Every structure is written in structure tokens, then in C-alpha cells.
Image: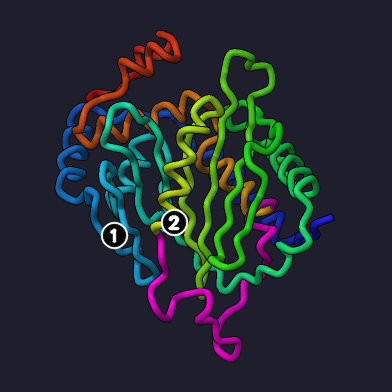
Amino acid sequence: MIRINPHARNAWLALALVATALFAVAQPNEADNASLKAEVARVRQVGPAEVALHDQARLKLPDGTMFVPQPTANKILKSMGNHGDERVLGLIYPLTPDQDWAMVAEYEPAGYIKDDDARDWNADDLLKSLKEGTAAANEERTKAGFPALEVTGWAEKPAYEAATHRLVWAATAVHPGATNEPAVVNYNTYALGRQGYISINLLTDSKSLAADKVHARDMLSRLEFVEGKRYADFDSKTDHIAEYGLAALVAGVAVKKLGLLALVGVTLLKFWKIGLIALAGVGSLWPRLRKRFGKQDTAAAPDA
């Protein structure tokens, strides 16, 4: 069984509850939308391009994609009802109308994360911890006006590549009783560095996962820490070691991610994708998604 420090786990759970409580589907008014659209047009970086991620890493952005950096990224998140987060590096999304995924890049200065527990972890134990943490948050989640969540299984079991210090995993979750909604997936990719880790998390649903995760894995392969910040540059005499191991990025920290990014409802997930494209001024996916998901959300469609 994976052992996670109970105090650390409680802290992560508290963060999950706060994040969930702060979520609400909010649409910007027309003036704010226009202002933000103009700002995105000024600051966006369109691939192919090399994007600096703080002083930690470089991302080789592929053709046909766009990166929106801070502080504009947090303005977009807030326009969608999120409180924003200083850990967010930026938002990544496609420029082509045949793709409707979105990615959130974050940097967590947790310190050097020891990866030796990856040799012994058990996927069933990790899933059990993830389910328990999510279930424990449901009481507060429903008090805050959000539906309960149930983690149903792995969409992709945790896999760690020791040679490159990269981790990938994905879990599926549903709202109990919501039989007409596809399972929502938060596809998580991580790259470990000397002082912390960078995550690039794909927001999608179970129906689109097979096609969309290709882009997430490609993006992860394009991320490289700069010299001096790499995992191999760790100095045990001077560097801070994280209070948790690699397994916690699945079974502990993940509880916060589930509440923060994707699993508050498929409707909100749709608005992430639609809103990012629309705000970028590169064409709206709303007509196609409205047909795909039904007409019940027509009144809430953002301005293109």
C-alpha cells in the first residue's frame, strides 16, 4: 500500500475543497470579452516557437498551437469563473477548428522529488487512494453547490520513465446519476526538475481521449529544463528535497488537481475549450459543440 503523510494529504484535500468552492461558470460581458480578446492577440505566442517557462524550462511549441502566458492566462481563467493560480505558467490550445482540447501548464516549486517509490508502487493502491480522497471531498463539494464526483478508474495507469524523469497518468470520473454525460478525463503529464516539477494537463472527455492524448504526450516531449535546473543537476548539499515522493503526484496532489481543473462538470469543461478559442479570436467551436452535446446550453454560449 502506498503511504502518504496524513498531514500533507489533509493539506492537499483542503486545497481541493477551496479550489472547488471557488469554481463557478461565469461568462464575461461583451466589453470585457473584447478587451481580453485584444490582449490575447497581443501576447499570444503562435507555434512554431520556443516558449520560456520562467527560468526553469523551454517549450518548443508546435505549429498549429498557441500559448497564452501570464498574467493573461489567469485573466482567462477568472473570466471562466476560476480564481486563477500563481503556479499557472500559461494556457495551450489548438488553432484549428477540428480540435477542441485545452492544456494548462503549471510549475510547482516543490523541491527535488525523489522517484525511487515508482519502482514499488501499485496502480490499484494508487487508484484506491485517489478514489478515497475524491469521495472525502464530496460533502464540501455539494455544500458549495457542485455535484459529487466519483473516480471510476484509470483511463491510463501511472507510468514513469526514469530516464527522462517524466510521469503520465489519467483517471476517469463521473457525476453519480448523470447517465448522459461522458466521463471526464484530466490527462496529467509531469516533467521533474531540480527544484520542482512542471505539469501540462490536458482537459478532455473520455470520448476524445484517444485522439487528444497524442497532443499531450507530444507537448511533454517538447519540454526541456534548462541547464542548471535539470533533475540531474540536483545537489544534495544545497537543494531542498520535496516532502513527498512521486506517488503523491498521483494519489495526493492529484486530489487538488481533480477539483481545480476538470472534474467539476462536463459543461464547465466545454466552456474551457469554447472560451479559449473564442477569446483568441481564431473562430468559435460553439456551433459544432452545440450539435455534439445538445442545445441545452445555447443561452450560455460565449461571444465569439
Label 1, on which residue? 51
Q: Amino acid at mark 1?
A: Val
Q: Quadrant of the C terminus?
A: top left
Closer to the camera: disc 1 or disc 2?
Answer: 2
Q: On the image, which quarter does residue 249 sit in?
A: bottom right
Q: Nearer the viewer, residue 78 or 195?
A: 195
**Residue 43, image x and y in percent?**
19, 51
Label 2, on which residue? 221
Give the left or right position of residue 102, taking residue 49 as reference: right
Asked if the residue under mark 2 is in contact with the one under mark 1, i.e. CB atoms within 8 Å, the reply is: no
What is the secondary structure assignment of the residue under circle 1? strand
What is the secondary structure assignment of the residue under circle 2? helix
Q: Quadrant of the N terminus?
A: bottom right
Question: Can the viewer see residue 139 in this picture?
Answer: no
Please tell me whether residue 248 belongs to the stretch shown in magenta.
yes
Badge 2: residue crowd in 10 Å (few <14, some 14–19, many ≥20): some
Dominant SS of magenta comes to loop
Badge 1: residue crowd in 10 Å (few <14, some 14–19, many ≥20): some
Residues in magenta?
223-251
Q: Is residue 300 above or below residue 221?
A: above
Q: Residue at x 68, y 66 (%)?
A: 245
Q: On the image, which quarter does residue 35 sit in?
A: top left
Find the distance from the CA under tag 1 to the CA under tag 2: 14 Å
Q: Residue at x 53, y 57 (%)?
A: 190
